[in-house]
Image: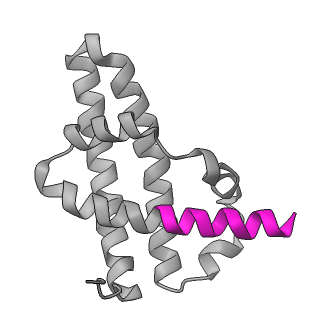
Amino acid sequence: MKQKPIPREELSEMFRLGAIRKMEEHEIFAIRQAEQPERSALFAELLTYTDIEWRYYDLALHYYADDMEYFENGLNEDLLLLTKTSELPPKLYAEYLREISPSARASEKITHSHLVALKKSITKVRDELR
């Protein structure tokens, strides 16, 4: 059975809440990195990931809110160039899911799947413009 599409306004709100969650996760991973030096490398990768993902979530919330002025300032050009390479390897993403709160996982999986689709669209358009 095919799922009903999520309205753009709802997606925008999901990404707004997701961006807040990414900032909170970043703080948690920074604390865990200090508390668990033996896992420091993992948390360093997750810190970088949440930094970049926060920016993508912010971009997605403006995209789904139809706020095209946000894209006219050119501040996210570097994000658009990173789009193809910004995904975590599956094993590291699984580790990320284990590290976040269980209550955040379902929402993360939904927003992440929409973000991956948006990134693919960005990459396709960018490649066609070359």
Q: Which residue occupies the extreme left position in the image? A: 103
Q: Which residue is painted at 44% across and 62% down in the image?
A: 57
**Secondary structure character of the magenta stretch overall:** helix
The residue lying toward the viewer, choosing from 49 and 106, is 106
Q: Which residue is painted at 35% across and 69% down in the image?
A: 16
Q: In the drawing, does residue 66 fall left or right of residue 26?
A: right
Q: Which residue occupies the extreme front position in the image? A: 1
Q: Which residue is painted at 48% across and 70% down in the image?
A: 60
Q: Which residue occupies the extreme top position in the image? A: 38
Q: Tell me residue 91's x, y (percent).
A: 37, 34
Q: Tell me residue 102's x, y (percent).
A: 12, 50
Q: Which residue is painted at 35% across and 65% down in the image?
A: 111
Q: How many marks?
A: 0
Q: Is residue 122 magenta?
A: yes
Q: Is residue 16 above or below residue 86?
A: below
Q: Which residue occupies the extreme right position in the image? A: 130
Q: Is residue 67 above or below residue 82?
A: below
Q: In the drawing, does residue 42 fall left or right of residue 1?
A: right
Tell me the magenta residue range: 116-130
Q: In the drawing, does residue 66 fall left or right of residue 16?
A: right
Q: Tell me residue 89's x, y (percent).
A: 46, 38
Q: In the drawing, does residue 119 fall left or right of residue 54?
A: right
The residue lying toward the viewer, choosing from 44 and 117, is 117
Q: Is residue 113 above or below residue 101?
A: below
Report the colour scheme: one colour
Q: Quadrant of the N terminus?
A: bottom left
Q: Quadrant of residue 43?
A: top left
Q: Quadrant of the C terminus?
A: bottom right
